[in-house]
Image (spheres, rainbow, N blue to C red):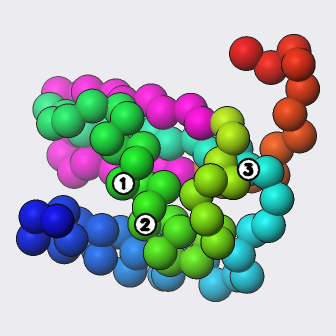
Amino acid sequence: MPPTYVAYKAEGVRHVHEQWDGVPIDGILALRIVYTCKTCRGDADNCAGTIMDLLQEAGVYANDRAVRKLSVRVIEDAACKSPSIAVRVSLWTPSYTDV
């Protein structure tokens, strides 16, 4: 892995540990990610993969295979002073009407 990616993931894990001190969530999960930046590099699926990996490394869940519903939103905002990522992990009960 490139050193910048490793450093980015380590910083992300540190941020998660500042906000998460619970036990790993067990079950079928839904994950919502909102990434806001001035000019975004990369694409939504790369952002999601990185976030899913670092949440696993941080102990939010044991394995990212438990994420069965994924929503990623990338917002480019010229007024954005500092990039931000908002993440919500929740238990999910699948239904055939979900799209």
Local crowd size for mark 1, using a 10 Å CA cut-off: few (<14), some (14–19), many (≥20): some
> What's the residue type where badge 2 is placed?
Leu
Labelled pair 3, 2 in contact (Cβ < 8 Å): no
Disc count in the image?
3
| Secondary structure of the residue carrying numbered label 3 | strand
| Secondary structure of the residue carrying numbered label 1 | helix
State the residue position of label 2.
Answer: 54
Q: Taking 53 as reference, is 19 above or below it?
A: below
State the residue position of label 3.
Answer: 29
Q: Taking 57 as reference, is 87 above or below it?
A: above
Local crowd size for mark 3, using a 10 Å CA cut-off: few (<14), some (14–19), many (≥20): many
Residue at the far left: name it.
3
In magenta, the rendered stretch is 70-87
The chief SS type of the magenta part is strand
Question: What distance separates the C-alpha of mark 3 from that of mark 2?
Answer: 15 Å
Where residue 95 sits in the image (x, y, percent)? 90, 26
Q: Taking 92 as reference, is 6 above or below it?
A: below
Where residue 5 sits in the image (x, y, percent)? 18, 63
> Would residue 99 appear left or right of 36 to someone viewing this image?
right
Q: Earlier in the sequence, mark 3 or mark 1?
A: 3
| Secondary structure of the residue carrying numbered label 2 | helix
Q: Which residue shows up at 71% across the image and 81% down it?
A: 22
Residue 99 sits inside the magenta stretch: no
Q: Earlier in the sequence, mark 3 or mark 2?
A: 3
> What's the residue type where badge 1 is placed?
Thr
Dividing the picture into quadrants, the one containing residue 46 is: top left
Labelled pair 1, 2 in contact (Cβ < 8 Å): yes
Q: Which residue shows up at 59% across the image and 36% down it?
A: 70
Local crowd size for mark 2, using a 10 Å CA cut-off: few (<14), some (14–19), many (≥20): many
State the residue position of label 1.
Answer: 50
> What's the residue type where badge 3 is placed?
Leu
